[in-house]
Structures are given as structure tokens and as C-alpha cells.
Amino acid sequence: MRLDDDGNGPSHNDRDHDRFTSYYWQYGVNLDADLDAYVVAPGYALDQGVHPGDLAFVIANGTWARGIVGDVGSSARGWGEVSLRMAWNLGVPTIDRPYPIGPVIPQSFGPVSATIIVIPGRY
């Protein structure tokens, strides 16, 4: 699992922080990674019918959480990036690293495998 801090919330020392999310461009509402549970879809998913606003479920850390597709990222990175709120809803801790790194999952917690399920239809 990778972490996304994009949106109108704090940058968490991330040099790649973007104050906009893909959801904003479609619906005029900007998300906040600290407050909104969302997943980041790879670009190629758009060709498969996935769009910002679609319902998303993430299974990880022995539990599950509900959110939306809130951002679109690089196809090369694939699936697996979630907002900070989604990680926290799954009981996954995060810490802010100094600039330029930004938020990470503590090594003491270990890597987190996740399954992401998207239901197209903009809920």
C-alpha cells in the first residue's frame, strides 16, 4: 500500500503534493486526503470504465473500508495507493517524513498488502 496526500489538506512535507485531486476536475469538489477516504486509480483504468467518484472498497490489515476513486495516477505504478484517511480507516498508521519524502507507513508496522475493488457508477 502506498499513501496519497493530495487535495486541499496539508502537504505532509511531500514534494509531489498536488492541491487538486482528479475528483475535483470532474465534480468541482476538491478532496482532502486527511478527511476523505479514496483510492488512486492508475491511468489505464479509465480505459476500463473506472472514473473519479466510483465506489471503492479496500481490504487490508485484516479489515475493510469504503471510499471512492478520488485521484488518477501513473499507469506504471498500478493500483495500491490510498488517501491517508483510507489508510487510517484500515488501522494503518502513518508518519510524516521530512521534506521531500512526505507520509509513509512506519517500517515497524511493515508493508501492507491491499486488495482494491472498484464498482463503476459514481456513487
Image: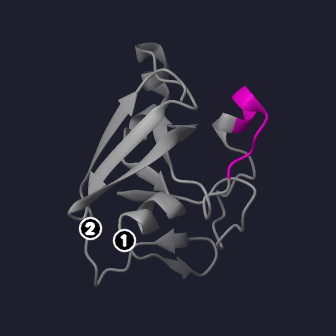
Amino acid at pointer 1: Val
* Crowdedness near tag 2: few (<14), some (14–19) or many (≥20) residues, C-alpha within 10 Å: few
The x, y position of residue 24, in whole percent, is: 73, 37
Q: Which residues are magenta?
A: 24-31
Please report the residue visible at 40 percent of the width from the left and 16 percent of the height from the top. 48
Residue extending farthest front: 123
Q: CA distance from mark 1 to mark 2?
A: 10 Å
Left or right: 45 with respect to 52?
left
Q: Nearer the viewer, mark 1 or mark 2?
A: 1
Q: Determine whether the residue tagged by mark 1 lies in a helix, strand or loop.
A: loop
Q: Which residue is mark 1?
A: 92
At 53% from the left edge and 29% from the top edge, which residue is drawn? 123
Height in image: 75 above or below 66?
above
- Between 100 and 20, the one lying in front of the other is 20
Q: Secondary structure at mark 2?
A: loop
Location of the N terminus (image quadrant): bottom left
- The correct choice, above or below, for 19 with respect to 40 in the image is below
Point out residue 41 in the picture as x, y percentages from the top left corner. 46, 36
Q: Amino acid at mark 2?
A: Pro
- Outermost residue toward the right in this view: 28
Task: Determine whether, in the image, residue 118 is placed left or right of residue 53.
Answer: left
Relative horizontal placement of residue 99, taking residue 49 as reference (left or right):
right
Is residue 109 covered in magenta? no
Q: Earlier in the sequence, mark 1 or mark 2?
A: 1
Q: Which residue is mark 2?
A: 111
